Image (cartoon, rainbow, N blue to C red):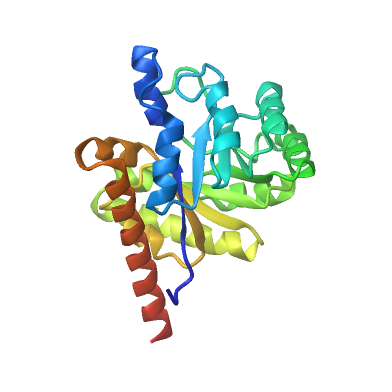
Amino acid sequence: MTFRRLRLGVNIDHVATIRNARGHRHPDPIRAAKVAAAAGADGITAHLREDRRHISDDDIERLSREIDLPLNLEMAATEEMLGVALRHKPHAACIVPEKREERTTEGGLDAVGAHNALKPYVARLKDAGIRVSLFVAADPAQLEAAVSVGAPVVELHAGAYAEATGAARDAEFARIRKAAAAAERLGLECHVGHGLDFENVGPIAAIANVVELNIGHFLIGEAIFGGLDSTIKRMRALMDKARAEAEGRASA
C-alpha cells in the first residue's frame, strides 16, 4: 500500500449485548475481538458503562490479558471508571457522555461546559501512559476545549451524518471534513465514529486528516447475515479503497 493507512477500531459492545440477553457465556466478545484482529482490525473498542448493560468488568480483564491489539476503553468521566482504566491500563481511553436512559451514546461530550471537570481525568489518564481521546461533535469550540483540557485525540461524532440524507447529509459531511482539518491544525489526532456503515463510510474514509474510524453496531448486526470475518474484511476494503482513491486524486 502506498497510501496512508486508515486505522479501523472494531467495537464489540453488542456481542456482549446479545450474550447478556440470555445471561450465559455465548456469544463471547473476546472471541469476536480475536476474529476482528484476524480480519484486519487495528484495535478493539469496548464501552464499560455504569450499568454494565453490555461489556462487563470481566470482559475488560480478559481483553487486557488475551488480545494483542490495542484496547480502546470508552468510559464516562467518573472515579469508578478512572479506577478501572488505571487498573488495566488500556492503550487508549475515550471519554464519552453517558446517560442511563439512552440506548446508545446520543451526542458528543460537552468539553466546553465540562472543561474543569474533565481536565483532572485527562491528566491522570495521561500520567498513566494512556492515550486520551474525547468523543465530541464536529464543532470548533469543542476541539479547542479538547486542546485546553490536554486531550491529544478527538473522535468526531458522525451520528447526524449517518442519519441524514441528501443535502442534509452533504452539510453534515462538510462539518466533519472541516472539523477534521481544524483538529489537525490544532495538533489533535482526529478519529470518527458512530453510525458508519458500508454505504456511508467511503466519504469519511477519504478525509485525509482522519486517522482512525471506530465502528461497532453495524459490523455486529451485519455479521448475523454475512459473518463477522467477511463483514470486517469488506469494511476494511471499502476504507482502503476510499483512502487510496482520495490520495490518488490529491496527487494527480
Image quadrant containing the N terminus = bottom left
Residue found 40% across the figure and 37% down from its top: 32
Across and down, in percent, residue 134 comes to: 60, 43
**Does 196 appear above or below 171?**
above
Image quadrant containing the C terminus = bottom left
Across and down, in percent, residue 169 comes to: 31, 52
Quick one: 82 or 161, which is closer to the camera?
A: 82
Where, by quadrant of the figure, is residue 92 drawn?
Answer: top right
Q: Is residue 246 left or right of residue 184?
A: left
Residue 239 in view: yes
Q: Is residue 150 left or right of residue 207?
A: right
Residue found 51% across the figure and 19% down from its top: 52
**Does 125 appear above or below 233?**
above
Question: Which residue is farthest bottom?
Answer: 252
Question: Which residue is farthest front?
Answer: 66
Across and down, in percent, residue 245 comes to: 34, 73
Quick one: 24 or 14, which is closer to the camera?
A: 24
Residue 109 in view: no
**Does 134 appear above or below 86?**
below
Residue found 51% across the figure and 65% down from its top: 209
Question: Which residue is farthest left?
Answer: 225
Looking at the rendered structure, the number of numbered marks drawn on it comes to 0
Across and down, in percent, residue 144 comes to: 66, 52
Residue found 37% across the figure and 51% down from its top: 39
Where, by quadrant of the figure, is residue 64 drawn?
Answer: top right
